[in-house]
Amino acid sequence: MVDNKPIALDDMYNPRWTSGIGVEKEGVCPLCWINGELRTFRTKVSAYWYHMNFFHGISSATCQPYEPPRAVRQVVLTTRLMMEGYCHQCSQWIPLESIKIITVNVRQIYWWKHAQKCHIFPVSKPSPSLPPTIHPTRNTRKRQLTTSNTI
């Protein structure tokens, strides 16, 4: 095993120890190691990425845990209640459970799968109540065109 220095002090994603090269390269999960397990995953075939994203909920883009739902509610289905979480990024209610009645190993996997696709930026989007044309860092060209057309 080779010591692999973290990118930053709060880096929770990158493996601390690696071995092998190319397709044979494996990384030790730092979170499993803290819990007393020595679990290695291949890095070149996305096994490490999948484990960190969907077993621990750690984003490969930010090296931090995914942000949890802003709110949680229960929705009545025909046969049972289901939990939904409110996403700060897309402003939608996301199912936190399967529609089917099944047992899952990691309960948060539905939220983490949504977050992996939706939470692209580490910073939240502007409030949905603001029109996109008046946000100072977005749509600046569109704002300039509309102001020049009114003159």
Image (cartoon, rainbow, N blue to C red):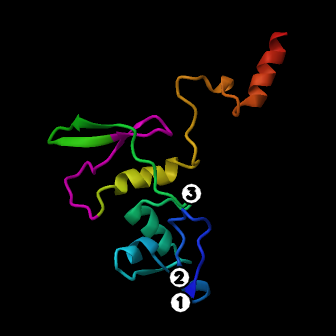
User: Where residue 59 sits: x, y (%)?
Assistant: 51, 59
**Main secondary-structure element of the magenta-colored stretch:** loop
Magenta-drawn segment: 85-105
Q: Which residue is mark 2?
A: 17
Three-letter residue code for mark 3:
Thr
User: Where residue 34 sits: x, y (%)?
Assistant: 39, 74
Find out whether the residues at labels 2 and 3 contact each other: C-beta distance under 8 Å.
no
User: Where residue 112 sits: x, y (%)?
Assistant: 41, 54
Q: Which residue is mark 3?
A: 62
Q: Is residue 74 above or below residue 41?
A: above
Q: Is residue 2 above or below residue 7?
A: below
Camera-nearest residue between 79 and 57: 57
Q: Earlier in the sequence, mark 2 or mark 3?
A: 2
Three-letter residue code for mark 2:
Trp
Q: Is residue 114 above or below residue 10?
A: above
Task: Please tell me how crowded label 2 is: few (under 14), some (14-19), or many (20+) other residues with Cα within 10 Å.
Answer: some
| SS state under label 2 | strand
Is residue 45 toward the left or the right of residue 142 in the image? Answer: left
Q: Residue at x 45, y 75 (%)?
A: 29
Find out whether the residues at labels 2 and 1 contact each other: C-beta distance under 8 Å.
yes
Q: Which residue is mark 1?
A: 1
Q: Residue at x 54, y 83 (%)?
A: 18
| Picture quadrant of residue 40 | bottom left
